[in-house]
Image (spheres, helix red, strand yellow):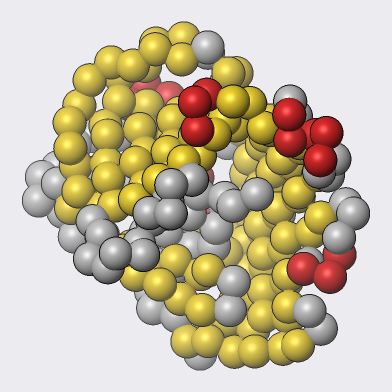
Amino acid sequence: MKRFALPIALFFCSVAAAAAPPTQIEAEYIVTTNGGITIGRANESFSRQGDAYSIRSETRSEGILKTFIDDQFTVESTGRVDKEGLRPLEYAERRAKDNKRDLKSTFDWKISVMHTVLRGEPSDAWFPPGTQDRISIMYQFTHMTEFGDTLVIPMADRRKINTYTYKLLEQGRIATPAGEFDTRHYQRVTSEPNDTRVDVWLAKDRFNFPVRVIFDDPKGFKLEQLVVALDAK
């Protein structure tokens, strides 16, 4: 199951005030595909103690998908918190029934190099300031103090680093199973035919936590994550 990924090196066009970042978040998402068919459920937790953070996300098969693939995908990120937000030190992905695709990355911020082991093969990649991993990105939004019309984003995506641009489309209230939220709606700017479009809605009154995310693959596969429970403090 692909996870949404949005790290943070930002160029701002406008400024908005934000509350102090949270120390604890518990969230649950329902995962659906084309036509609203339920295929999974994700449970996530974020915890901060001092300048250290930890994130854990577990996505399990549900609905029609469970008939064919009964599995659980676990993602973990640990690192430090500084004035720029989250700084990942270690990131890991693992599947309960297929460990051949398990991945582990460590971030050496002194030399800006990410060390990754995938399928038993090590590799290195240089990363720019502000880089996030695939899950810390979600929680980096909650540590931002300013928002603008354009976000320029470096993201660690398995063995490599990608940079994405997101544009603010609109602001408004949306309804979810967890309640209604005032949100900022950002969309990824695509430049190639094979680029996946990504839309994310950030809840202003819940530390700008992503409460809805849509991945729209050009091949016709559409995946949505919608929050069904959220406790942030």
Left or right of residue 124: residue 111: left
From this view, report whether residue 68 is shown above or below residue 50: above
Of residues 23 and 154, the one drawn nearer to the viewer in this rendering: 154
- For image coordinates 23% across by 34% down, the residue present is 17
Left or right of residue 155: residue 3: right
- For image coordinates 35% across by 32% down, the residue present is 201
Q: Is residue 48 in view? A: yes
The quadrant in which residue 183 appears is top left
From this view, report whether residue 197 is shown above or below residue 173: below
The quadrant in which residue 162 appears is bottom left
- For image coordinates 74% across by 41% down, the residue present is 58
From this view, report whether residue 101 is shown above or below residue 179: below
Left or right of residue 92: residue 70: right
- For image coordinates 29% across by 52% down, the residue present is 188
Whole-percent x, y for residue 47 in the image: 65, 41
Of residues 70 and 44, the one drawn nearer to the viewer in this rendering: 70
The extreme left residue here reads 13
Whole-percent x, y for residue 117 in the image: 73, 80
Of residues 224 and 104, the one drawn nearer to the viewer in this rendering: 224
Of residues 148 and 228, the one drawn nearer to the viewer in this rendering: 228
Q: Is residue 232 in view? A: no
Left or right of residue 168: residue 38: right
Q: How many marks?
A: 0
From this view, report whether residue 65 is shown above or below residue 154: above
Q: Quadrant of the C terminus?
A: top right
Whole-percent x, y for residue 211 in the image: 45, 28
Whole-percent x, y for residue 7 in the image: 42, 58
